Image (cartoon, rainbow, N blue to C red):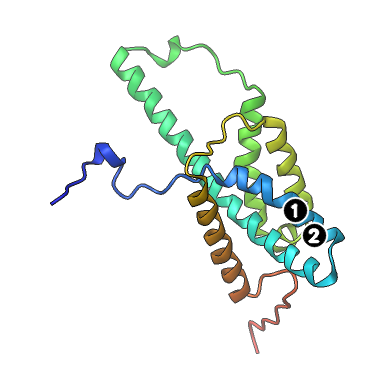
């Protein structure tokens, strides 16, 4: 009988790494934008719907970044506790380009929850520019086929959720709250 320890596989209940979402977003969004602008009429419709789903997936990456920052802060607190360094002894915080990039990648995707913002390409283009400006040096291509499959399944799940909720760009919502 095999037993797994927490140290060999990380925390119990740990979410899978969502770091693949940034390169997948940077790869798929330009194609979806091209198809939504230059494609045939039927392609435009589905490209816009896939773009809306891709935009919502980027919120998961934002949550992933928040969790990474929380874990980094806990690590810093633990190191300070073990070494006896007081917070007053640390140098002052000075924001740099990486800080602003990270802040944009954490805050802007939450605007995709608004239907009008999600269904337009402008915020996607802004996030794409921020990703491109940051470079691709930290992207991990290990186990790429499984990351592609994982992203594809996420895309299908979010697309299905949007379709069921009638939130896709080509769907009309006729909700009457009070009859």
Q: How many marks?
A: 2
The one nearer the camera, 128 or 149, is 149
**Residue 13: % across, % down:** 32, 50
Give x and y (percent) for residue 125.
76, 46
Q: Secondary structure at mark 2?
A: helix
Q: Which mark is residue 35?
A: 2
Give the CA separation, mark 1 to mark 2.
6 Å
| Residue found at x 61% / y 34% | 102
Q: Residues within 10 Å of mark 2 (few under 14, many from 20)?
A: some
- Disc 1: which residue: 31
Say which residue appears at 71% left-offset and 36% top-offset. 132
Tell me if mark 1 has few (under 14), some (14-19) or many (20+) residues whose alpha carbon lies within 10 angstroms of its own.
Answer: few
- Where residue 118 sits: x, y (%)? 71, 58
Which image quarter: residue 160? bottom right
Side of 161 where 127 appears, left or right: right
Would residue 8 appear left or right of 3 to someone viewing this image?
A: right
Q: Is residue 130 above or below residue 151?
A: above
């Amino acid at each position: 009988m095999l037993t797994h320890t927490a140290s060999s596989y990380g925390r119990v209940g740990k979410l899978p790494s969502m770091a693949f979402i940034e390169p997948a977003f940077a790869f798929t969004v330009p194609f979806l934008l091209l198809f939504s602008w230059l494609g045939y009429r039927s392609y435009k419709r589905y490209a816009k719907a896939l773009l809306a789903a891709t935009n919502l997936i980027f919120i998961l990456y934002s949550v992933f970044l928040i969790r990474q920052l929380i874990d980094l802060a806990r690590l810093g607190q633990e190191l300070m506790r073990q070494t006896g360094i007081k917070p007053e002894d640390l140098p002052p915080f000075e924001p740099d380009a990486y800080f602003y990039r990270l802040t944009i990648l954490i805050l802007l995707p939450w605007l995709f929850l608004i239907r009008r913002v999600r269904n337009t390409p402008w915020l996607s283009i802004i996030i794409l520019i921020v990703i491109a400006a940051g470079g691709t040096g930290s992207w991990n291509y290990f186990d790429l086929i499984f990351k592609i499959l994982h992203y594809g399944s996420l895309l299908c799940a979010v697309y299905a959720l949007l379709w069921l909720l009638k939130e896709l760009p080509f769907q009309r919502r006729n909700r009457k709250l009070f009859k």
